[in-house]
Amino acid sequence: MLIIAATPIGNLSDASPRLIEALQSSKFICAEDTRNLLHLANALGIKLAARLFSLHEHNETERLGQILEIAMDNDVLVVSDAGMPTVSDPGFELVRAAVAAGVEVRVIPGPSAVLAALAVSGLPTDRFSFEGFLPRKSGDRRKTFDGLRSETRTMIFFESPHRLAESLQDAAEVLGADRQASLSRELTKKFEQTMRGPLSELAEWAKVEPKGEMVLVIAGASKTAKVAADLVEPAIALAESGIGLKAAVAELAETFGVSKSELYQLVLEARKLR
């Protein structure tokens, strides 16, 4: 079988007894970076007796056959550098192939930066979406945020420190400066910190380029904001029919009871992205 196991995202004390036992007893281990795995084992004070395989984004596809063949008759432990494999980490292709091949897949749960950041965000946790890493280029990020403009669930993103300020600025301009959000860095580590507030304030704070792993959590759209976002395309179509943008926005805003200025800004932003 395949055994997918979560590793600490910072604090080594979060390594579960099940993880430690699995690391010590496994004969075959797939790791995102075998050097990091050896470092983890050393930090935990354990010795590995397993045959190690690297499994990362550049070789996962070509490794599938070899690993699945082993997993037909043996247990294969799969770990990433931090957190749960397959979640913005290698392992998804392997798990999908194992399921298709009839290989049993089990899990050793553990630390998750996604859930940790959501839990401390102060934002709604009943419904949420994980969006992974944001695109590197501003234009692509804006398109991503634009596509999520009417998303009512809390949204979770990963971002690197040196792009954080620009990403927050893009989010503020597309989703609204007052949209509530939280930013967690160095989760479970000594200098763990979570900042909360409107996107515009977080963007200003991030200009100092804080260090560490970042998880951005953004509140979903309110019901009225979702209605306004859903009216963007109808407003553009109505404006292009000949009555003009301001008249189209005014008509739809009055009909559906949304802010005229908010809808107008949404339409202008949508036009920029075309």
Image: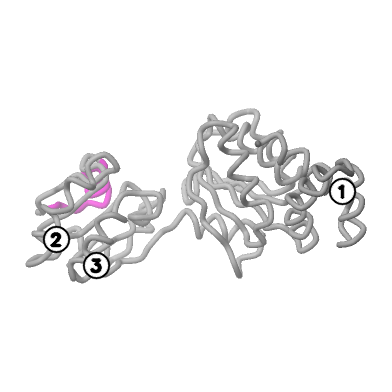
Question: Do the numbered discs 2 and 1 sit on residues whose CB atoms are within 8 Å?
Answer: no
Q: Nearer the viewer, mark 2 or mark 1?
A: 1
Mark 1 Cα-neighbour bin, 10 Å: few <14, some 14–19, many ≥20: many
- Residue 39 shown in magenta: yes
The residue depicted at 9 percent of the width and 51 percent of the height is 51
267 relative position to 186: left or right: right
Q: Secondary structure at mark 2?
A: loop
Residue 36, position in %: x, y? 26, 42
Task: Tell me which corner region of the image, top left, top right, bottom left or bottom right, holds residue 270.
Answer: top right
Please identify the dominant SS of the magenta region.
helix
Q: Nearer the viewer, mark 2 or mark 3?
A: 3
Q: Nearer the viewer, residue 120 or 252?
A: 252
Quarter of the image with the N terminus is: bottom left
The correct choice, above or below, for 107 with respect to 43 in the image is below
Q: Which residue is mark 3?
A: 99
The correct choice, above or below, for 23 with respect to 241 in the image is below
Mark number displayed over residue 194: none
Task: Tell me which corner region of the image, top left, top right, bottom left or bottom right, holds residue 100.
Answer: bottom left
Amino acid carrying mark 3 in the image: Val
